[in-house]
């Protein structure tokens, strides 16, 4: 049996929150990440927490991106990160959340702090795509055989 050795870009798993039916944000993120040379698995909108967990375990992504447009990202995201971080295989996985996290449209430092304390590596509630790209560019390549 021949094996090929090399490296590849880690998979990025993109998902909406369980209550968010928006798709344009997920398509935008997928196209952006693919343009940056990343392999993307897009779970789409209204992804139940159990589906996100199962997909993360199946694909072993280097990054999980949770996107919210409907304003319920804080509550849905808080529940989801607890599910993901409860699994030992995902303890070191980079997981970020971004978009509209609350319904009032205001930046809420307390929500950002709580999401970070719950286990998100970064909260992108400010639309800082340069910072997001920098994070993506730091993802380590993985060896393949």
Image (cartoon, rainbow, N blue to C red):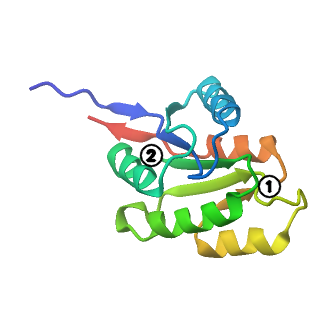
Residue identifier under label 1: 125
**Secondary element at image label 2:** loop
- Nearest the eye: 89 or 140: 89
Front one among 5 and 75: 75
Which residue occupies 61% across, 46% down? 138
Q: How many marks?
A: 2
| Residue 82 x %, y % | 51, 70
Which quadrant of the figure contains the N terminus? top left
Q: Is residue 134 above or below residue 112?
A: above
User: Residue 35: where, in percent of width, then height?
Assistant: 64, 23
What label does residue 30 carry, if any?
Answer: none
Which residue is nearer to you in this view: 40 or 47?
Answer: 47
Vertical relation: 34 (above or below) 14: above
Q: Quadrant of residue 104?
A: bottom right
First of labels 1, 2 by sequence position:
2
- Answer few, some or many: residues within 10 Å of disc 1's Cα (few below 14, many 20 plus, some between 14 and 19): many
Q: Callout 2: few (<14), some (14-19), or many (20+) C-alpha neighbours within 10 Å?
A: many
Kindly identify the residue that appears in the image at 82 percent across and 46 percent down: 127
- Residue at the image position 46 percent from the left and 39 percent from the top: 10
Image point (79%, 55%), residue name: 125
Which residue, as the protein is rendered here, is positioned at the far left?
A: 1
* Residue pointed to by mark 2: 61
The quarter holding residue 134 reads top right
Nearer the observer: mark 1 or 2; the answer is 1
Left or right, 137 with reference to 63: right
Image: 90 above or below 117:
above
Instruction: Give how far across and how far down residue 52 sits, in percent.
Output: 45, 51
What kind of element bears circle 1? loop
Q: Quadrant of the C terminus?
A: top left
Report how far apart the C-alphas of labels 1 and 2 lie in the structure.
22 Å
**Is disc 1 in contact with disc 2, using a CB cutoff of under 8 Å?**
no
- Provide residue 113's location: percent of width, then percent of height: 74, 73
């Amino acid at each position: 049996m021949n094996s090929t050795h090399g490296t590849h870009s880690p998979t990025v798993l993109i998902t909406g929150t369980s209550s968010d039916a928006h798709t344009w944000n997920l398509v935008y993120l997928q196209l952006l990440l693919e343009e940056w040379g990343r392999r993307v698995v897009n779970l789409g909108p209204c992804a139940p927490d159990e589906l996100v967990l199962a997909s993360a375990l199946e694909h072993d992504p280097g990054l999980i991106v949770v996107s919210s447009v409907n304003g319920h990202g804080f509550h849905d995201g808080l529940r989801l990160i607890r599910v993901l971080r409860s699994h030992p295989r995902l303890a070191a996985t980079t997981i970020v959340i971004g978009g509209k996290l609350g319904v009032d449209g205001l930046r809420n430092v307390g929500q950002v702090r709580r999401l970070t304390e719950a286990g998100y590596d970064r909260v992108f509630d400010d639309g800082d795509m340069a910072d997001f790209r920098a994070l993506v560019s730091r993802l380590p390549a993985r060896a393949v055989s």
